[in-house]
Image: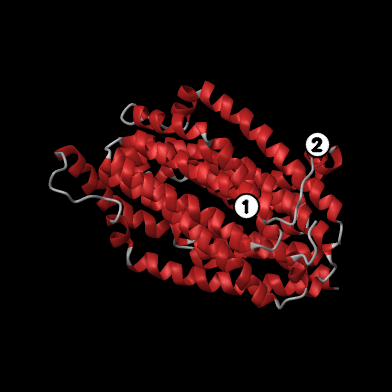
Amino acid sequence: MANGKRSTTLGTDPISKLLVRQAVPASIGILVMSLNMIVDTIFVGRWIGPLAISAITVVIPITFFIGAIGLAFGIGGSSVLSRALGSGNDSKALQVFGNQVTLTFLVSGLLAILGLVFQNYLIEFFGADDSFKDLALTYYRIVMYGIVMLSMCMMGNNVIRAEGKPKFAMYAMMLPAIGNIFMDYILINVFDFGMEGAAWATFISYAICFAFVLWFFIVKSELRLTLTNFKLQPKIVGEIASLSSVTLARQGTVSVLTILLNNVLIVQGDALDVATYGIISRMLMFALFPVIGVNQGFLPIAGYNYGANQFQRVRESINTSIKYSGALALFIFAIIMIFPAEIVSIFISNSKTLSAETMAHNSEILSRTPSALRWVFAATPVIAIQLIGASYFQAIGKAMPALLLSLTKQGFFLIPLVIILPQFFGVWGVWISFPIADVLSTILTGYFLNKEVVKMVQ
């Protein structure tokens, strides 16, 4: 391991300064990555049609779950890695990273193979109907070829941040996003490749990200791996898996929720309601980028200082992160409430050259989506407590509380609400489930977070 480690600053610099230094690059990276998803959706919506948005909405949770294998091993393993760096145990940090690489490659590779073998079944199960199934399959097959690269990138990105080098983590998200936007324009608009063009643009973006992450760990990283580090060690694997299960369960729950939402919307409404949710889900990622960035910046700070037994700094990092992300969430809430129609119109073409059917679909999207968008974001001002609270337990290595609190919104509240409320209120019942789940999960997380912080400083 290189001398003069940047990671030691996590235990010495002022918390506000550290949080800004960690959160701003993370936020920018997430912004560019979410802009990538937004532009992808805008391009297919404007140049292919609303049913193409429905197709991508069905495919995303499948590919997202496999890609999230890397995110899970990245976040869970990096919690172990951050605490190892904080306690000065460099050899363990190297072993943890090597095992993260091996686990990510093996598990995501196996799931990618299974995903291609059972593609027809999965697409139907995730909510595709005959009106857009062929579009979904076209996109799905090509994207799946590169899904292992995405998984490795998501793992590597979190390790880069755990090293205390957030700018490189930002670059790892920015470069593929910019590449995808450029390739979308070339392949969809210039060469008119339709859904195949959108899919190949996404594949190329995965390859760009993988190439950058590989370059970083060969050239810039403090973590210099040897072949022995890649050999799985049961104790290390157990530590990584226990904490990775938190993220994996959360992302798995998101995929289950998306399956449920797609199917409920098809039953209670139609394919255009799936497109409406597709637009809203992109906005959830895009609009909340600064809040998620603060949360990402908080993780290595809390983990490092907890490992170094600097509990007052841990408490300060919690309070500062909640204040920053809460203020940002309030601002986002105001924008969504004031400009919902203008936001939705970005995704829809008003060209006179469109077919009568596509123009009718666009009109329906413009009619349905603004109100739904407002309802989904209605409780945004309170979400900071839930996000930071669940992340805190993961950062300090307490897997079970982290798992349970991470599942509160989607698993314990939102999924049951989405099952029950549409039975009485139709599609509107889907949209009002979101703010109710936000409020309930925030109350529960706030209670346990406060209890843990009081215990820690006694």
Instruction: Give percent across and percent down for residue 365.
Output: 28, 48
Q: In the image, what residue type sits under mark 2?
A: Leu
Instruction: Give percent across and percent down for residue 341.
Output: 29, 60
Q: Is residue 3 above or below residue 215?
A: below
| Quarter where residue 340 is shown | bottom left
Callout 1: few (<14), some (14-19), or many (20+) C-alpha neighbours within 10 Å? many
Quadrant location of the N terminus in the rendered image? bottom right
Residue under label 1, please give it.
Answer: 157
Quadrant location of the C terminus in the rendered image? bottom right
Of the numbered discs 1 and 2, the one sitting upstream in the chain is: 1
Instruction: Give percent across and percent down for residue 100.
Output: 72, 43
Q: Is residue 319 above or below residue 400?
A: below
Q: Is residue 294 visible?
A: yes
Q: Is residue 222 left or right of residue 409?
A: right
Q: In the image, what residue type sits under mark 1?
A: Asn
Instruction: Give percent across and percent down for residue 444.
Output: 65, 59
Callout 2: few (<14), some (14-19), or many (20+) C-alpha neighbours within 10 Å? some
Q: Are marks 1 and 2 in contact (CB under 8 Å)?
A: no
Q: Is residue 427 left or right of residue 398?
A: left
Spatial CA distance of label 1 from label 2 is 21 Å
Residue drawn 55% across the image and 71% down it: 326
Q: Is residue 16 left or right of residue 2?
A: left
- Report the front residue among 339 and 103: 103
Q: Which mark is residue 180?
A: none
Q: Which mark is residue 232?
A: 2
- Report the front residue among 435 and 77: 77
Residue drawn 69% across the image and 75% down it: 15
| Quarter where residue 384 is shown | bottom right
Residue drawn 70% across the image and 43% down it: 245
| Quarter where residue 269 is shown | top left
Q: Is residue 442 visible?
A: no
Which element type, helix, strand or loop, lies under badge 1? Answer: helix
